[in-house]
């Protein structure tokens, strides 16, 4: 019998996390460390989909201007996610974790296309699925793409890995008396302008379909495994 709290999860990793100690690009040591952190959940049979960001290479909103159209800037951002997804896939496989990279932008020479049935098949075969290209359209971020994909693949939760250990009532970097919130409703998370940890579009979509999101700090030993196990110290939105 499967004792897991969650059987299928979507993990959102930002580009910044994959860059580790570097200002940009990929830190392979961080990616390799992630494999160790995911191993206990994989051994328990949890199916894992990873949506990777691309902010360590480019963000459309910041790149647009001076002749670069927003749509093109977003295409460049999506290509950034592709670079992360390809690197992460290889590093996972080099550590013995069966992994497939599926792309939401046409790139047949470098990755399999994202096809719903194919993604399900890989997951059922206990392969980690890493998604490149977000949702494949401009004016989107990988946060929104993560929620959309989690819905499409029947995930029970979206785990958004961040640098901070959850949602605070005010910015903990500026205010020493900021208090961490353990649980917050979708209504509050969407309405509160100060909650910027996740895109409002992503939160709105999750709210509409009642898909919980957990905001947590991934780069602490055991944190990912605890969170997948339902024992997070982060913030539960739902
Ligand atoms: N992007 C996009 N459509 C998507 C996902 C991403 O256009 O479905 C672009 C967008 O420009 C975004 C960039 O890719 O800024 C990188 O993604 P994101 O900013 O979400 O990365 P993160 O901040 O998580 O590293």
Image (cartoon, rainbow, N blue to C red):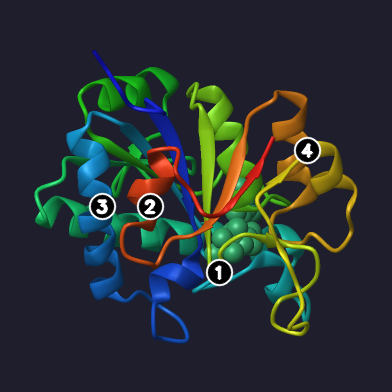
According to the image, label 1 marks what residue?
Answer: 55
**Measured Cα–Cα span from mark 2 to mark 1:** 21 Å
According to the image, label 4 marks what residue?
Answer: 186
Are the residues tagged 1 and 4 within 8 Å (C-beta)? no
Mark 4 or mark 3: whose residue is earlier in sequence = 3
- The image shows residue 185 at horizontal and vertical percentages of 77, 38
Residue at disc 1, CB closer than 8 Å to ligand 1: yes
Left or right, residue 231 beside residue 129: right
Q: Secondary structure at mark 3?
A: helix
Mark 1 or mark 4: whose residue is earlier in sequence = 1
According to the image, label 3 marks what residue?
Answer: 89
Are the residues tagged 3 and 2 within 8 Å (C-beta)? no
Residue at disc 4, CB closer than 8 Å to ligand 1: no
According to the image, label 2 marks what residue?
Answer: 224
Q: Secondary structure at mark 1?
A: loop
- The image shows residue 71 at horizontal and vertical percentages of 71, 57
Q: 10 Å neighbourhood of mark 4: few (<14), some, or many (≥20)?
A: many
**Measured Cα–Cα span from mark 2 to mark 4:** 22 Å
């Amino acid at each position: 019998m499967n004792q897991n709290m969650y059987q299928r999860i979507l993990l959102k990793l930002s580009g910044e996390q994959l860059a580790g100690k570097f200002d940009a690009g990929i830190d392979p040591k961080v990616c390799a460390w992630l494999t160790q952190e995911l191993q206990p959940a994989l051994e328990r049979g949890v199916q894992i989909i990873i949506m990777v960001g691309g902010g360590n290479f480019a963000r459309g909103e910041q790149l647009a201007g001076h002749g670069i159209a927003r749509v093109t800037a977003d295409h460049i951002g999506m290509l950034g996610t592709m670079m992360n997804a390809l690197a992460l896939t290889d590093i996972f496989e080099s550590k013995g974790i069966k992994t497939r990279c599926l792309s939401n932008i046409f790139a047949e020479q470098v990755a399999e296309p994202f096809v719903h049935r194919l993604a399900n098949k890989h997951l059922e075969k206990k392969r980690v699925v890493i998604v490149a290209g977000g949702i494949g359209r401009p004016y989107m971020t990988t946060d929104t793409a993560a929620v959309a994909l989690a819905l499409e693949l029947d995930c029970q939760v979206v785990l958004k890995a961040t640098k901070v250990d959850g949602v605070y009532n005010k910015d903990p970097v500026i205010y020493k008396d900021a208090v961490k919130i353990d649980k917050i409703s979708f209504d509050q998370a969407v309405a509160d302008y100060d909650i910027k940890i996740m895109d409002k579009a992503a939160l709105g979509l999750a709210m509409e379909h009642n898909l919980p999101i957990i905001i947590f700090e991934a780069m602490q030993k055991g944190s990912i495994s605890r969170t997948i196990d339902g024992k997070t110290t982060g913030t539960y939105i739902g």
